[in-house]
Image (cartoon, rainbow, N blue to C red):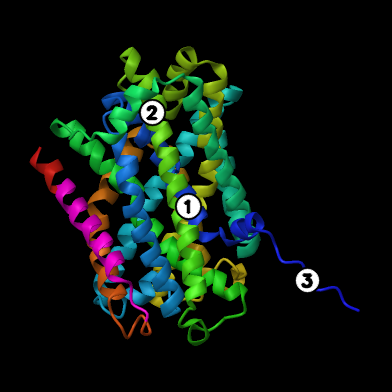
Amino acid sequence: MTTPPVKPGPIRRFFSILGPGVITGAADDDPSGIVTYSIAGAQLGTSLLWTALLTWPLMAACQMMCARIGLVSGRGLAGALQKKIPRPLLIVAAFALFVANTINISADLSGMADVTQLLTGIHARIFIVLFGLAILVATIRFRYAAIASMLKWLAAVLFAYVFTAFIVHPHWPSIMVATFMPTWPKGHAGWSTLVAILGTTISPYLFFWQASQEIEEEKQKGHRTEASRRGSSDKDLNERAIDVGVGTFFSNGIMYFIILTAALTLHAHGITQIETSRDAVKALQPLAGNFAALLYATGLIGVGFLAIPTLAGSAAYAFAETFAWRQGLDQELRRARAFYGVIICSVFVGILLTFTSIKAMDALFLTAVINGILAPFLLVGILIVACDNAIMRGQPSSWPARCAVGLTTVGMFVAAVALFWA
């Protein structure tokens, strides 16, 4: 007599659902995001804590719309956008994504290496090369299932920022006021910081990565062709909604605690200018203690290993879908040379950029601002695709989702215009 299979409990079932949404959410808190949030807290104190609450449902709506496009259309984001957007514009968007992501990779590597130098005393440039090569080898050598598993576990390092925030003993009543009673930014610095927060939270590379991960997940289930991937069950869509909701909540929660830590330590002691990630750790050390500084540094290094494959991979997916290349992290290098070529080129150029005179902190913040300006234009295209009944196989995004993404698009346009006006 055979023993019937044991059904997993609710907790195990919940964690089995988590995947692309959590990885994408964690990748959002890359070194660029960490530095941007640290700058926000150092310069403006707790005045922008409310943005973590505001951006969570907006980010969740955008990421779920991208996930739905991948699940239902059977194509990645660039492939779906081809149906509605002229190819030359899509090529320009792919190149723009590649440039922005490569600069971001360069700044991320610099941030990781600077912090590692502070911890070890070994010159940062050695770690820039070591980190870059290690990420490349892992991305090329391991298949998607192994990479996804590693990225999911790396997301856990971000809890370091939650612990760090509690170590500095916040005064919660005043923190709650700043959290739930928004104050508008003042001046160019305030508005540029707000746009940077929006740009690093609702970022173009996350849109492409989310949709492409859905394709990779479907391939793991044996759906190797586009035709076999078209359409999705309500169960799969609901599970992905939970995954994306948890991932974006996690991402915005970490953002909240990073701003809070910087506000209660750096800003409270008059330290408002940060030049490198190493400066942030060194300034935090005497104010919050060695352990808090170590947690901050550990989180930044760990999430860099998660974010850089996402940055390079999202650009590779965009090019591959635009030019109809063989693609996917489940492919071997010899079978997807162009796809992996984009990843290799992006990381190598990123390494080379670190040896120029460009300051990592300036590059990190600048890419966040650029993404804040470019993202709304991309969101317009995503909305057009998500509302198209033919592309979405009779499963277009719901009206509440369209309204949420539309509101996000308008909000980001307004913030960008306000930045230039200020």
In the rendered structure, the answer to whether residue 85 lies left or right of residue 13 reads left
In space, the residues marked 2 and 3 are separated at their CA atoms by: 47 Å
**Residue 264 is a magenta residue:** no
- Element type where label 3 sits in the image: loop
| Percent position of residue 199, x then y | 30, 48
Query: Which region shows up in magenta?
Result: 395-416
The x, y position of residue 201, in whole percent, is 35, 47
N-terminal label among 2 and 3: 3
Q: Residues within 10 Å of mark 3 (few under 14, many from 20)?
A: few
Majority secondary structure in the magenta region: helix
- Can residue 277 be spotted in the picture? yes
Identify residue for label 2: 260
Q: Residue at x 58, y 52 (%)?
A: 151
For label 3, the residue is 5
Q: Label 1 vs label 3: CA separation?
A: 30 Å
Query: Is mark 2 in CB contact (under 8 Å) with mark 3?
Result: no
Instruction: Reply above or below: 109 against 39.
Output: below
Relative to 304, say whether 10 is above or below: below
The quadrant where residue 392 appears: bottom left
Name the one closer to the observer, 100 or 28.
Answer: 28
Residue pictured at 24% horizontal, 33% vertical: 181
Identify the residue position indicated by label 1 in the image.
247
Q: Position of residue 189 (x, y in %)?
A: 19, 31
- Residue projecting furthest to the right: 1
Residue 76 in view of the camera: no
Amino acid found under the numbered disc labelled 3: Pro
As for residue 415 lying within the magenta part, the answer is yes
Q: What's the residue type where badge 1 is placed?
A: Gly
Where, quadrant-wise, is the C terminus in this rendering?
top left
Locate the N terminus by quadrant: bottom right
Distance CA(mark 2)–CA(mark 1): 20 Å
Side of 27 relative to 391 (left or right)? right
